[in-house]
Image (spheres, coloured by chain):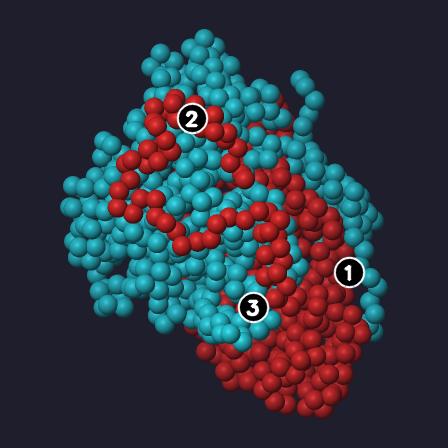
Amino acid sequence: MTKSNVQPTIFELSAPGRKGVQFPKSDVPTADLPKDFLREELPLPELSEHEVIRHFTNLSQLNHSVDNGFYPLGSCTMKYNPKINEETARLPGFAQIHPLQPAITVQGALGLMYETQKWLGEISGFDAVTLQPAAGAHGELTGVLIIRAYHRARGDEKRVKMLVPDSAHGTNPASSSMSGLEMVELPSDERGNVDLEALKAECDDTLAGLMITNPNTLGLFDENIHEVCQLVHEAGGLVYGDGANMNALLGIHRPGDSGIDVMHFNLHKTFSTPHGGGGPGSGPVGVTAELAEFLPFPQVAMTKEETEETLPFYDLITPKQSIGRVKAFHGHFGMVVRAFTYMLTLGKNGLRAVSEYAVLNANYLQALVKDTYHIPHERLCMHEFVAQGHWEDAPGIRALDISKRLMDFGFHPPTNYFPLIIPEALMIEPTETETKDTLDAFAETLLKIAEEARTDPEKLHNAPHRTPFGRLDEVKAAKELILRTQLPEGYGED
Amino acid sequence: MYIPHTNAEREAMLETIGQENLEDLFQCLPKDGRFPDLALPHGITEMEALDELQYIASANETTQELSSFLGAGAYNHYIPAAVDSLLRRGEFYTAYTPYQPEISQGTLQTIFEYQSLIAALTGMDISNASHYDGATAVAEAVNMAYHTFRGRRQKVILSPALHPHYRETVHTYMEGAPLEIVGEDLDPKAGPEELRPLLDKNTAVVIVQYPDFFGRIFDYAALGEAAHEVGALLAVHVNPLALGLLKPPSEFDADIVTGEGQPLGIPLAYGGPYLGIFATKQKYVRKMAGRLAGETVDDRGQRGYTLTLNTREQHIRRERATSNICTNQGLIVLASTIYMSLLGKHGLRQVAELNYHKAHYAAEKINTVPGYMVNPVQSFFNEFVVHCPRPAEEVNKHLLAHDILGGYELSKDYPELENELLVAITEMNTRSEIDYLIHVLLEE
């Protein structure tokens, strides 16, 4: 047994009487406390500032992150998060403004939001953009509600069917049903595109729309995208684009130009805002001019144009047939500042280079491993590709084992078991910010693991060996359901 | 700038792929509109970008420059330096959702500690790993209640004193469900007594706020009992900072507790990202949306944590999931966990009391200004309604002319409350700042 990496919890580190922060003494007379409402005990831990710093610093060192290693997680776009974005988001002029301040006192913030709406619209080919949604799934919900509102506004109540390809992210079907629509799954054809015959069969007058991810989760650009959109439009439906894979398309192709009506962006994927260990994200939604009046409120508008004497004036407005409010205040402004900084820094050429090199890296990596790992749809891929982690001559080995073994070499595993239509899927997205050397080392490791699968399968089954923790018992976690620290009797009483 | 390839490397890679140049990689895209000439400026250096952003930021007037008495769901609190110092660790903020527990224990243990702290603070059995903000947490509470009764109970009662943004968000989220949402058109100042008659066997949930949107503190125990008598759920939305002082909603036998976590060490940042708190009773654990971290052991016998009960979530359950939530507020969860760890039981109580005493001092002083009145009977925490002698909008304009960010004009959401201003006081407001506010009010 090597040294234990178990960290005590903050509750276990606590000792009565310690303090991590002091507030000034009250400078006003003491008021009577509301004795009917006072709580008797507050069972929170007591620590000094240094202990808190050391505890969380130690915890941080148990994480793999983009800053300390390759993170080829498919459909998550784990690219480098530029440090300047962290600085600009923390400028007092952005971090210390209240969301309900009068517009006249926050013209900088509103102007920045207005510009971001415009940039995102230009990049994607949409006429209007909302910055309200807090994450990709939240953007999907917003977009699907817009589609519903559009049909209803036309008195078209019978359109309740939403088509979702079988390669879609789980959030797509969940967003559809959350907004009261019926989800129908569409198969993919042998080239990984939406099956056109199956699509045609569903195009009737109950069709609300289609949710499509393009490039899809196989990393493939749908070669029939124009036809797909046309079929849906002819049947009276609208096309929703899941923009999770937009990192392949900046300055390359505008989804709005190919017939997509509504699309969400993931600022935390394409536009370099950090993933934060699971969030916060930001999921702006772009729409065609026809759908602009259904956007959630508030929307940022330029209510007075610039003149020779005066600056433009920006304000919050409510679109005419708005679907309503999707969260409090005005979206994840802090993430918008980061994304705007990123776009401003890169500019039009830099944005195009992002996608060119993201696609170069993915194709290069695919070329290096394709003779060893089966690629079910071997074409030029976009920013990611899907390989299979299984061989007939190594029957006991699964994608999971390969993933766990990769950790021993300092790599984060690819997304595995997704998309669901590929058995033992390993979905690999290197992003544009990785060097050729890193890709070479990663490919070499994958080939070595493929060899181990035949020669030493046990080594893979028991992996990882060199990480701070080994495989966690997930069955025990679900069975015992310990979801909080178990406090000893009397904890928190003085 | 962030792309590391040398020309030689690019050429070597293209050769391996078997393509001539970068443009060839996109040959399967429609020719029409390929490589659009975007109407955007060229890139600039980091140095220039910082300059540009500083210029934009300087057009905003901050709560540092102005004296702020604005709250209404977002509060200007002190954030200890240690919070941001830890948030800037790349190991935390450049990590993904902890789907690979062997190399994500830092994030997982943080979530587990957050769940433990929120459970302790609210008095509830369990907490999830967060929603986007207070508004979406409330909407998810309605969604959960609706699904708990499998759609058979179709009435939801919202207190008119629940934050207007939250009520609006509930309407948007639940648009697809056949729900009747009642209670909002009661007198805005209606208390729990007025909500009780609305309860019936068709009610899924009644939602109240604590302290409510007007800052008032009510005892919701009787309302909870009445709700439970007809089989409905009680959901209480809290300001978590107030729970440093006030008894937890578990004492009202709340079934769901939601909260806006922004007061726990999160900057105002013009409205986000904030933190949606969601806690409930053990018996509803499988009905609750969002991620959960659970304690377990690894194959070396070490105590560790992993995401658990994933079968409730969209990536497994797809169209049968009750919520589509995926990305949540990970880093904000970390910030609030650090904040609560630093303050601990005494610090949280101290800051809550500071808010309470300063707010009561301010209310008393404002009451002495001719024409201005604060309801002296009702208990409140750090926010209260001031009845003004003229429209609140005019009062605010006068205050702003003196570099004071006044309160929230209630007429924006309640047209009948034209002369009423919602004023918030926190530990950041010094006595002299409050006295200056009084001075400016007297002067008009």
Say which residue appears at 74% left-offset and 43% top-offset.
A52
Q: Say which quadrant the N terminus of chain A sits in.
A: top right
Q: Position of residue A312 (x, y in %)?
A: 50, 71
Q: How many labels sit on residues?
A: 3
* Callout 2: chain: B
Q: Residue furthest front?
A: A308
Residue A321 or A116: which is nearer the viewer? Answer: A116
Q: What residue sits right under mark 2 in the picture?
A: B11
Label 2: how many residues lie within 10 Å, few (<14), some (14-19) or many (20+)? some
Q: Is residue A88 visible?
A: yes
Chain (cyan): A
Nearest the camera: B103 or A292?
Answer: A292
- Name which residue lies at 67% across and 80% down: B401
Crowdedness near tag 3: few (<14), some (14–19) or many (≥20) residues, C-alpha within 10 Å? many
Residue shown at the point (39%, 70%) measured from the top left:
A319
**Which quarter of the picture shows residue B61?**
bottom right
Q: In the image, residue B280 lies at what x, y percent?
A: 54, 53
**Which element is circle 3 on?**
helix
Foreground tag (3 vs 1): 3
* Residue at mark 3: A107
Q: Secondary structure at mark 2?
A: helix
Same subunit, labels 3 and 2: the answer reads: no
- At label 2, the amino acid type is Glu
User: Which quadrant holds residue A400?
Assistant: top left
**Mark linked to residue B350:** 1
State the separation of the CA atoms marked 1 and 2.
Answer: 63 Å
Please give the letter of the chain rendered in red.
B
Instruction: Residue at 77% x, 56% y: name it.
Output: B347
Amino acid carrying label 1: it is Gln
Q: Identify whether B60 is placed above or below A190.
A: below
Q: Are marks 3 and 2 in contact (CB under 8 Å)?
A: no
